[in-house]
């Protein structure tokens, strides 16, 4: 269980308070108006955004002070998920160690993961030679291979067309669930939440609400979200 | 943490390399001597020639840039590229080229003499200014052209449809913004220029402070005088540098000149004349070197090839050392610190380093390493200016991804930053190599015949009136300088990463 206890995250003079728990293995969508602090919450969980007060814990272990790479978190960013000068295989293999020529074992695992996201033959290509959807798949493979219990998605598929976006969401959630991961994903589209999320965290005016079951949130939203959801 | 330590060490090395020699000069000089009348006149001449050089460069650049901004013609982009070349052109080569055009037996005098025009003498104050204009006119043109191209084309359309005076409405405000900065940058360059004054200046009426330092050290071995002059030069450089920093806008090395603004004003004939004259002024000396150099190449003695090899090794060493110091210093603070080296004259640094090593080794035996160090310090600010934007964009784009993958320290540099920096590093290494290759500064202080660099050997050939061989050496030097630049720049572009 991920527990933000009276947590306040601060980014560039903007603060976000969060007092909530997310259960392990659940898929949670983070919804709210632009600028409400969706990315700040993810950045706070990942360790990129400074935490001013409160405690962040994972399964009872305090992770508040840990640097990003020591947290049980892998992340798919909005863009720049792949190093453009490295091959797809090198990019994915970085999940298991800072080596550009991965060991045999790491290479096997990376290729295995690439096969699972449907990129068997593209391991030696550079990202620029891939389509947007294929790049997303490679980034997903890297995040999955990182083998961290929480996968954060900061709208990584927002540049894709609607069909491809839905396909990537399904694939990400399916593979993450199969690996027993918790998924926390930012979205500005309630349909995304309806499609894959078990629960929804609403964010409005600097405060993150505790997760509410998705159908309940969408059909009978708390007062501050009525206007936003329309 | 480790990265911080490396950065601090690099900063200390740079600070030590600058302050050590300056302290040595002041200390060994036993304090300062009062400035003599000759010193004061050197100070006056330095400021005077730099002011005129900058004024004429900017003044001539305005019509040339104006013409280039609104005319498109075959070879336009090549011409603008060539205008970037004087920055890496060895000074001594350009001077030889100017001599062959404007010198006593030069082309201009050969044409004008039968017409009864008095003979043009390139030695002296006006020769110094002529050479400085040759070097800085292209820079001024590029800076001002950038200003012109920064005016949105819609404004020209609006002005044309209103039949409004384009100059007063659009161009004068732009020039008022850009020209002072261009003037200041060129002023600084001319304040610190040494090789031009060494070859074309001299005497009571055309001696700069830099040249006076050289003479105090080389001919009188008067260290206290050299120290006093060094401080004068330091203040001059710092003062002018500060003014330039405040006034200068725009990116001296920037690209993006391929746009031509469509215009409905100006005379085609006049524009063509300005472009033609500027091209002739810039290319004629280079053509002269090329033509005379080809036949001179055959006359090159073995000594020249040795000098070329020494120069090549010195510049390659300078490239490696500059990069090693630059990478840890790619920060705002590092860039500011590196300006320290640029504000101190190369001759002062060289003199100081000479004094430091003098008790232990024969100074002429470290002439090359000292030349290399001085070139490293001179190149560092340019290199940092080139690298910093790329480091910052790499940090912005991939910093979080790197951190989430646990990439830190050397691994972060190896896997993320260095590959992203490849292109600007190639360009910066090329500039450093070319500048070091053509440098004729500190080496003049303590090089012995047969042990110097190629520019030094060429200078000696000119002094001995062996012009054929000097032309050959010039062609070799210019080839090596441009070749070094090309090779590094190309290396940075190879296997282009997206």
Image: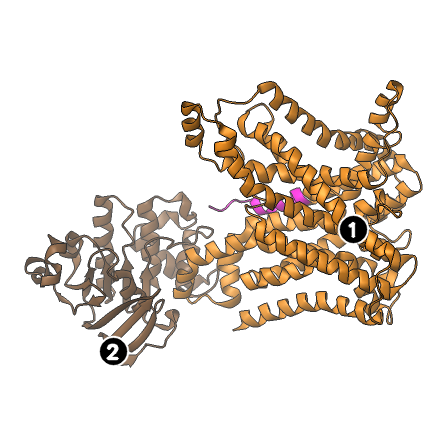
Chain colours: A brown, B orange
How many numbered marks appear? Answer: 2
Q: Tell which residue pokes out farthest to the left in this image.
A: A220
**Residue assigned mark 2:** A59
Q: Residue at x 14, y 63 (%)?
A: A198
In percent of width and height, residue B391 lies at 51, 56
Q: Which mark is residue A182?
A: none
- Regarding mark 1 in the picture, which secondary structure is present there? helix
Q: Residue at x 89, y 36 (%)?
A: B467
Query: In 3D space, how far apart are the residues under numbered discs 2 and 1 (Cα atoms)?
Result: 76 Å
Q: Left or right of A116: which side holds B111?
A: right
Taking the magenta stretch, the answer to whether it contains residue B492 is yes
Could you tell me if residue A122 is visible in this image? yes
**Residue assigned mark 1:** B44
In percent of width and height, residue B382 lies at 62, 52
- Regarding mark 2 in the picture, which secondary structure is present there? loop
In percent of width and height, residue A177 lies at 21, 63
Neighbor class of circle 1 (other Cα within 10 Å; few <14, some 14-19, many 20+) is some
Q: Left or right of B103: which side holds B1?
A: left
Magenta-drawn segment: B485-498
In percent of width and height, residue B328 lies at 58, 64
Q: Quadrant of the N terminus of chain A?
A: bottom left
């Amino acid at each position: 269980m991920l527990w933000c206890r009276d947590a306040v995250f601060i980014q560039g003079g903007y603060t976000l308070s969060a007092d909530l728990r997310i259960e392990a293995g659940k898929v949670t969508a983070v919804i709210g108006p632009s600028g409400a602090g969706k990315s700040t919450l993810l950045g706070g969980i990942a360790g990129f955004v400074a935490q001013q007060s409160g405690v962040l814990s994972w399964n009872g272990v305090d992770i508040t002070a840990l640097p990003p790479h020591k947290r049980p978190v892998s992340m798919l960013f909005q863009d720049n998920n792949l190093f453009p000068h490295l091959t797809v295989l090198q990019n994915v293999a970085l999940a298991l160690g800072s080596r550009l020529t991965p060991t045999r074992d790491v290479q096997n695992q990376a290729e295995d993961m690439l096969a699972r996201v449907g990129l068997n033959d593209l391991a030696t290509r550079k990202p620029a030679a891939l389509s947007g959807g294929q790049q997303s798949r490679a980034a997903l493979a890297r995040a999955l291979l990182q083998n961290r219990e929480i996968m954060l998605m900061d709208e990584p598929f927002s540049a894709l067309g609607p069909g491809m976006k839905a396909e990537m969401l399904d694939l990400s959630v399916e593979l993450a669930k199969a690996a027993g991961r918790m998924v926390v994903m930012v979205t500005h589209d309630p349909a995304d939440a309806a499609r894959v999320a078990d629960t929804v965290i609403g964010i409005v005016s600097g405060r993150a609400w505790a997760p509410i079951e998705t159908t309940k949130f969408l059909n009978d939203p708390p007062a501050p979200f009525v206007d936003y959801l329309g | 943490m480790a990265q911080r330590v490396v950065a601090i060490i690099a900063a200390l090395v740079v600070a030590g390399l600058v302050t050590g020699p300056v302290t040595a000069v002041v200390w060994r000089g036993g304090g300062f001597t009062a400035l003599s009348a000759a010193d004061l006149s050197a100070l006056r001449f330095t400021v005077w020639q730099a002011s005129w050089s900058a004024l004429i460069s900017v003044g001539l650049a305005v019509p040339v840039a104006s013409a280039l901004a609104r005319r498109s013609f075959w070879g336009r982009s090549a011409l603008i590229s060539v205008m970037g070349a004087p920055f890496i052109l060895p000074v001594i080569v350009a001077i030889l080229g100017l001599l062959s055009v404007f010198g006593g037996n030069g082309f201009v005098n050969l044409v004008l003499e039968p017409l009864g025009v008095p003979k043009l003498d390139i030695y002296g104050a006006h020769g110094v200014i002529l050479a400085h204009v040759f070097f800085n006119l292209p820079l001024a043109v590029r800076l001002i052209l950038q200003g012109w191209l920064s005016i949105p084309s819609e404004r020209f359309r609006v002005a044309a449809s209103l039949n409004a005076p384009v100059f007063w409405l659009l161009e004068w405000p732009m020039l008022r913004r850009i020209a002072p900065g261009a003037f200041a940058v060129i002023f600084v360059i001319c304040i610190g220029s040494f090789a031009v004054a060494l070859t074309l200046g001299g005497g009571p009426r055309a001696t700069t402070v830099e040249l006076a330092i050289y003479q105090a050290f080389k001919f009188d071995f008067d260290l206290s005088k050299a120290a006093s002059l060094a401080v004068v030069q330091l203040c001059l450089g710092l003062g002018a540098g500060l003014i330039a920093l405040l006034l200068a806008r725009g990116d001296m090395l920037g690209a993006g000149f391929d746009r031509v603004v469509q215009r409905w004003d100006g005379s085609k004939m006049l524009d063509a004349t300005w472009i033609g004259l500027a091209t002739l002024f810039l290319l004629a000396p280079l053509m002269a070197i090329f033509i005379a150099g080809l036949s001179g190449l055959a006359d090159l003695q073995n000594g020249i090839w040795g000098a070329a090899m020494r120069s090549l090794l010195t510049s390659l060493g300078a490239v490696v050392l500059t990069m090693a110091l630059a990478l840890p210093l790619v920060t705002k603070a590092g860039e500011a610190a590196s300006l320290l080296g640029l504000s101190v004259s190369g001759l002062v640094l060289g003199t100081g380093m000479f004094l430091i090593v003098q008790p232990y080794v024969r100074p002429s035996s470290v002439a090359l390493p000292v030349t290399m160090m001085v070139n490293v310090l001179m190149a560092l600010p340019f290199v940092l200016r080139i690298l910093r934007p790329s480091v910052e964009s790499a940090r912005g784009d991939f910093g979080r991804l790197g951190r989430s993958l646990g990439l830190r320290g050397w691994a972060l540099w190896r896997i993320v930053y260095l590959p992203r920096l490849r292109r600007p590093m190639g360009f910066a290494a090329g500039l450093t190599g070319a500048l070091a290759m053509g440098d004729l500064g500190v080496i003049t202080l303590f090089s012995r015949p047969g042990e110097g660099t190629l520019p030094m050997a060429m200078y000696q050939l000119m002094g001995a009136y062996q012009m054929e061989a000097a032309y050959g050496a010039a062609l070799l030097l210019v080839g090596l300088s441009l070749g070094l630049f090309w090779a590094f720049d190309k290396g940075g572009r190879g296997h282009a990463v997206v």
